[in-house]
């Protein structure tokens, strides 16, 4: 499908290009690094089920709303909210939250992405082979506390992200999504085939899909909801921005379903790759962020062919992170292009350099890193997502909303259901996450 280039802003050249770029934004460290360890921390199957419910009932409806705002205005976050709500309207602050989030999330996300890159190098150079569990644990602790190495990794990752964003929508973002996403899927399937042969696969499968209601806690439910925002890249205008490059006739609902399915499928596959490896090696999984960077290398060190598997795994993690960092940078870049009339080159270089600078404190210390991660995921994203839902559900006219929903869609009959969920269920559910974030626990 060819797009109509709106005022030279750029547009997706193909329908599949949009799906891959948006799925690339969604699939990232959240799926492969974070989802498995929060699943382990929350006892497995019951948490997974609640998470799936959150994706369908909260994430998907908000994704449709976000893409709608972008597509109808063909503008980036701040300009889009201004166009739909009028100059000086408080709703415009949702656009600002998006730009701020783009800067803040990317600043710490790039640090973890830099570690992933570092681990690709370590795997290739055989640094894991023959290492004891203690040595591997110490190696990660050393990397994550050695500011110099973390800053270097982060800078390299930011430089690659900037280079790809410089190419623009079609020749940069879309082109690389079309290369990286299929490679990522191939690597994941290859690793899955390997995990299927391991003795721990059965236990891992039961862990991820077995439902034990007693494992579920109120905090787990809220964590699942919060994660569904992060993993689908919602609440900060990334989907809005990508939607602004979408062709007028494209099916927003069908595309959103495809993106959510890819994102969720890959998160589940990541669990089915990871847990058989750690279960077979008899390693503790409830290790938090160290699951991927400590437990997994320990298991790889014990396995035949572990060096190759480790290389593939960390390359997969880096690729997944890259298609996400591209989308975060694009939120900031498109803001400067649309609002200040900057050229893409200037917008990319200035915002990329600023984000790299803001990332330095995250690379230097856990406290700042955790502050950034908690503030963005627990406060800014829920506020942005809730605001977007309220905006589309209650503020914009039915005409725009309905037209955008049904344009070219096979799902037109679900319009009423979607609107009902967005009007009532989403605000209550997201309100609960938000209350928890500010310390009020309803459960
Ligand atoms: N969805 C990404 C992940 O799961 O890793 C993270 C992310 C990307 C969040 C882009 C927000 C965003 F705008």
Image (cartoon, helix red, strand yellow):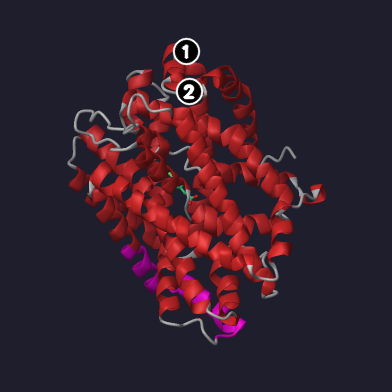
**Residue, disc 2:** 391
Q: Position of residue 268 (x, y in %)?
A: 60, 52
Taking the magenta stretch, the answer to whether it contains residue 151 is yes
Q: Nearer the viewer, residue 426 or 259?
A: 259
| Mark in front: 2 vs 1 | 1
Residue 438 seen by the camera: no
**Residue, disc 1:** 398
Q: Residue drawn 49% across and 38% down?
A: 258
Q: Main secondary structure of the magenta part?
A: helix
Q: Residue drawn 42% across and 24% down?
A: 90
Q: Residue drawn 25% across and 33% down?
A: 338
Q: Residues within 10 Å of mark 1 (few under 14, many from 20)?
A: few
Respond yes or no on whether mark 1 lies under 8 Å from ligand 1.
no
For the record, the magenta segment spans 131-156
Respond yes or no on whether mark 2 lies under 8 Å from ligand 1.
no
* Residue 181 horizontal side relative to residue 87, left or right: right
- Quarter of the view holding residue 56: top right
Q: Position of residue 87 (x, y in %)?
A: 32, 20
């Amino acid at each position: 499908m060819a797009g109509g280039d709106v005022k030279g802003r750029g547009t997706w050249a193909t329908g599949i290009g949009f799906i891959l770029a948006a799925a690339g934004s969604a699939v990232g460290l959240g799926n492969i690094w974070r989802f498995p360890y929060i699943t382990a921390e929350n006892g497995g199957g019951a948490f997974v089920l609640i998470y799936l419910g959150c994706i369908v009932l909260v994430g998907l409806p908000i994704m449709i709303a976000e893409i709608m705002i972008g597509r109808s205005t063909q503008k980036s976050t701040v300009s889009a909210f201004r166009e739909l709500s009028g100059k000086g309207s408080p709703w415009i602050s949702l656009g600002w939250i998006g730009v701020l989030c783009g800067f803040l999330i990317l600043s710490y996300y790039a640090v973890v992405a830099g570690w992933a890159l570092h681990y690709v190098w370590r795997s290739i150079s055989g640094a894991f082979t023959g290492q004891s569990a203690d040595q591997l644990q110490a190696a990660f602790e050393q990397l994550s506390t050695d500011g110099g190495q973390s800053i270097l990794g982060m800078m390299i990752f930011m430089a690659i992200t900037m280079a790809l964003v410089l190419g623009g929508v079609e020749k940069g973002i879309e082109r690389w999504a079309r290369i990286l996403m299929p490679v990522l899927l191939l690597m994941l399937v290859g690793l899955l085939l390997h995990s299927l042969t391991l003795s721990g696969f059965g236990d891992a499968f039961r862990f991820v899909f077995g439902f034990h209601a007693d494992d579920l806690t109120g905090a787990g439910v809220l964590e699942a909801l919060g994660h569904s925002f992060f993993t689908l890249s919602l609440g900060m205008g990334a989907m809005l921005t990508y939607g602004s490059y979408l062709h007028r006739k494209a099916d927003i609902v069908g595309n959103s379903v495809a993106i959510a399915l890819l994102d969720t499928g890959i998160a589940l596959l990541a669990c089915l790759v990871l847990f058989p490896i750690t279960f077979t090696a008899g390693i503790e999984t409830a290790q938090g962020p160290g699951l991927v960077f400590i437990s997994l290398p320990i298991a790889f060190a014990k396995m035949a062919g572990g060096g190759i598997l480790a290389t593939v795994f960390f390359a997969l993690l880096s690729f997944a992170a890259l298609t996400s960092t591209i989308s975060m940078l694009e939120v900031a870049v498109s803001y400067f292009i649309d609002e200040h009339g900057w050229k893409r080159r200037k917008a990319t270089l200035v915002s990329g350099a600023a984000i790299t600078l803001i990332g330095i404190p995250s690379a230097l210390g856990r406290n700042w890193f955790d502050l950034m991660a908690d503030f963005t995921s627990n406060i800014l994203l829920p506020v942005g997502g809730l605001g977007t839902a309220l905006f589309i559900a209650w503020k914009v006219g039915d005409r725009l909303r309905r037209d955008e929903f049904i344009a070219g869609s096979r799902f037109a009959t679900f319009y009423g259901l979607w609107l009902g969920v967005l009007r009532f269920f989403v605000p209550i559910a997201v309100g609960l996450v938000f209350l928890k974030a500010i310390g009020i626990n309803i459960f």
